[in-house]
């Protein structure tokens, strides 16, 4: 459980909101910036750790607020060092984040919703269904609750960022602001299937990198596995991204999960090359995570290397993202779905 009943979490607040709340509670608003510093930068779990705000003020703060940095519901460590954390909100929503250390690079993959309503056929979160949006507080606390520094943040966990755009924009602003976590905007990537109104808002109000989940260059094939294609075709989204590309210095990529015999043929590769030629948009090739009861399997390592080599030599940047944490349900949504299922079984009994 995250919030103590009746208390307001400081995590998730902007300086303006903090000042207003302090003023409403007859506390001098000059303490706002120090409070945000202690919560976002020093990651305190108790106001007792603050040493530059008078004791009397601290006592009052403790009655009204909490830092919002709370432990996860559970965690599982993979043999490869990545750790999957499961959270449970005050209303009982489950959501996950995954910590992926790789040398000096420490990445956290965060969730923006509990479940998802986009219904992509290959995704465990899609099968779990939609259980609610996360607030900026719930998104940011996935980062601040870790006791060590995170260098990169990717919005690739549960949920579709462009289906919870306002809270995602707030969270991005807290991540990059000097008064917030002060992370480099180039180290933050938002991954979307392309809900166009949300994406265009995100492009206007953040400067983070954007990844579009493409998975096939053919609209009819994409529509068969990603219902969003019928409403907002990837081709139209790529056009919008191309226009934006000239305006802001951010990195655009497309994610391409490679499924054996489905989207890893020469025909797909040629069409992918054609689609992205001259756009400067890079391709991130990912292995497929088989889901329980599923007959699909990932393309082979050799095939992925071939795709990468072909794209790079034809002038389109490409890289391969390795699988991490397979032994702890790495595919997004699998841990939350399995815990929620266990809980519902207990409730039925
Ligand atoms: Fe939702 Fe992303 Fe899964 Fe699609 S792939 S169902 S958008 S979480």
Image (spheres, rainbow, N blue to C red):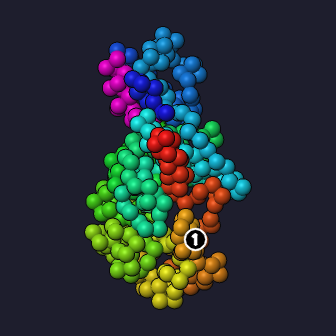
Near-viewer residue (155 or 249): 155
Q: Is 338 situated above or below 149? A: below
Is residue 135 rendered magenta in the image? no
Residue 53, image x and y in percent? 51, 17
Q: Is 265 situated above or below 234? A: below
Kindly report the secondary structure that dominates the magenta region of the rendered protein: helix
The image quarter in which residue 28 lies: top left
Near-viewer residue (342 or 51): 342
Near-viewer residue (265 or 341): 341
Mark 1 Cα shell of 10 Å, populated few (<14), some (14-19), many (≥20): many
> In the rendered structure, which segment of residues is drawn in magenta?
10-25
The answer, for residue 106, to whether it is visible in the render is: no
Residue extending farthest to the front is 349
Q: Is 18 situated above or below 264? A: above
Q: Residue at x 46, y 74 (%)?
A: 215
Residue 158, image x and y in percent? 46, 54
Q: Quadrant of ligand 1?
A: bottom left
Q: Residue at x 53, y 70 (%)?
A: 294
The image quarter in which residue 289 lies: bottom right
Q: Is residue 76 left or right of residue 72?
A: right
Residue 98, image x and y in percent? 57, 51
- Disc 1 is placed on an element classified as strand
Q: Is 279 situated above or below 265? A: above
The answer, for residue 111, to whether it is visible in the render is: yes
Q: Which residue is mark 1?
A: 287
């Amino acid at each position: 459980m995250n919030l103590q009943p009746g208390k307001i979490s400081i995590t998730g607040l902007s300086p303006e909101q903090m000042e207003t709340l302090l003023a409403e509670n007859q506390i001098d608003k000059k303490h706002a910036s120090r409070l945000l510093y202690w919560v976002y930068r020093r990651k305190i779990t108790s106001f007792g750790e603050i040493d530059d705000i008078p004791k009397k003020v601290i006592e009052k703060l403790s009655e009204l607020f909490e830092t919002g940095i709370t432990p996860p519901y559970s965690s599982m460590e993979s043999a490869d060092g990545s750790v999957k954390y499961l959270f449970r909100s005050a209303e009982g929503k489950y959501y996950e984040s995954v910590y992926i250390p790789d040398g000096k690079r420490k990445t956290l993959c965060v969730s923006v919703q509990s479940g998802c309503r986009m219904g992509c056929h290959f995704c465990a979160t899609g099968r779990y269904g939609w259980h609610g949006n996360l607030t900026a507080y719930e998104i940011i606390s996935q980062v601040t609750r870790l006791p060590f520094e995170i260098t990169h943040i990717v919005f690739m966990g549960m949920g579709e960022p462009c289906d919870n755009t306002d809270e995602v924009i707030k969270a991005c602003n807290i991540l990059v602001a000097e008064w917030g976590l002060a992370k480099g905007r180039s180290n933050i990537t938002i991954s979307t299937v392309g809900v166009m109104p949300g994406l265009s808002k995100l492009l206007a109000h953040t400067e983070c990198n954007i990844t579009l989940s493409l998975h096939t260059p053919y609209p009819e094939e994409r529509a068969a596995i990603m219902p969003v294609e019928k409403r907002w075709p990837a081709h139209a989204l790529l056009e919008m991204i191309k226009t934006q590309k000239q305006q802001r210095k951010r990195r655009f990529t497309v994610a391409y999960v490679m499924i054996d015999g489905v989207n890893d043929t020469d025909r797909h590769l040629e069409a992918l090359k054609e689609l992205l030629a001259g756009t400067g948009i890079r391709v991130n090739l990912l292995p497929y995570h088989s889901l329980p009861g599923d007959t699909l399997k990932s393309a082979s390592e050799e095939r992925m290397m071939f795709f990468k080599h072909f794209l790079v030599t034809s002038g389109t940047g490409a890289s391969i993202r390795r699988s991490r944490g397979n032994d702890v349900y790495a595919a997004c949504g699998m841990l939350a779905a399995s815990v929620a299922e266990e809980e519902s079984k207990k409730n039925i009994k």
